Image (cartoon, rainbow, N blue to C red):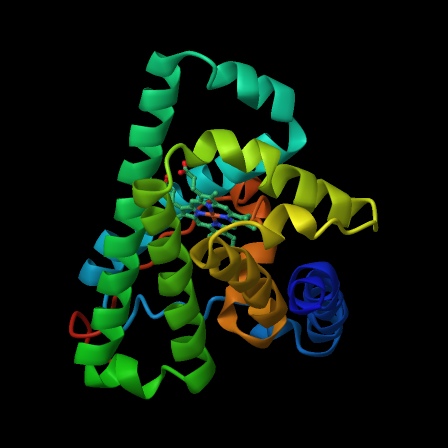
Amino acid sequence: MTDLILFGVFPYVAVALAVAVGSYRYVIDRYSWSSHSSQFLESRLLFWGSVPWHYAILLILLAHLLAVLFPSGWGVLLGRPVRLYFLEVSGLALGLCTVIAIVLLMARRLTDARLAAVTTKIDWLVLGLLLLQVATGVYIAFTLRWGGVWYVHTATPWLRSLLTFQPEVQYLAVLPTVVKVHAFNAFLLVALLPFSRLVHALSVPLGYLARPYQVVIWYRGKTSL
Ligand code: HEM
């Protein structure tokens, strides 16, 4: 029963919340639909945390997605030991990169009083859950070999069953607790998307690719105005 609620019902609640509250926020308070950059307050640590975080997490999420969309192709890809090792080692390197990056981003907000002042409770909650997500992911990859392979026979059918509105939670029910925590936490983060600055993950700023560039020039201290 618990598995049914956590993995058969909660994912729908999370997605419904993300869509409904997200759309409401977009219409009612579009300015708040942002990551609320703190680059003006501090930029050096932000660079070393944010850039690796975004590249690594996007590649990891792409791998999660490809294994769901093309399970047979994914199986063929991992069918040769050399390719399996290559992908698992790359995944681990990227996973460790995300852990280090999120710890750095959290430390940055903890140690700078100006940043701490603009960091809300929901920011800390989301940062903590993101840390939990990537830390459990790396732990799984380290301890439950070979995740890339068994994912296709467990997580893939579970996630595909959710897409067809016929949840088959038995695929997850048999997995170790840490995998269940990892899977549940993923949907908890989805549920929190519209309530936090994580909402920026839903907007891909494609307009920036075509927009004329802007040059920002500091006049302070250079003129007598
Ligand atoms: C918010 C969504 C998610 C994020 C950010 C995330 C993040 C991660 C990270 C950072 C890793 C470590 C990668 C590595 O070191 O190889 C990982 C591994 C893994 N994740 Fe996720 N994950 C998410 C959703 C899920 C879901 C829904 C499942 C389904 C059960 C899942 C199952 C796994 C498995 C089985 C591994 C081990 C892969 C391996 O050993 O190669 N993840 N995840």
Residue 21 picture quarter: bottom right
Q: Which residue is drawn at 22% across and 62% down?
A: 104
Residue 45: percent from left, percent from top:
20, 61
Q: Residue at x 40, y 32 (%)?
A: 146
Q: In this orientation, does residue 193 appear? A: yes
Residue 207: percent from left, percent from top:
59, 46
Q: Is residue 80 above or below residue 175?
A: above
Question: Front-most of 79 and 199?
Answer: 79
Question: Front-most of 44 and 171?
Answer: 171
Q: In this view, does 130 lie above or below 170?
A: below
**Total numbered circles:** 0
Q: In this orientation, does residue 203 appear? A: no
Residue 206 picture quarter: top right
Which quarter of the figure is the N terminus placed in? bottom right
Q: Is residue 49 above or below residue 138?
A: below
Residue 91: percent from left, percent from top:
35, 35
Q: Which residue is drawn at 25% across and 84% down?
A: 114
Q: Residue at x 66, y 60 (%)?
A: 7
Residue 198: percent from left, percent from top:
51, 65
Which quarter of the figure is the C terminus placed in? bottom left
> Furthest-right residue in view?
165
Q: In this view, does 119 lie above or below 92?
A: below
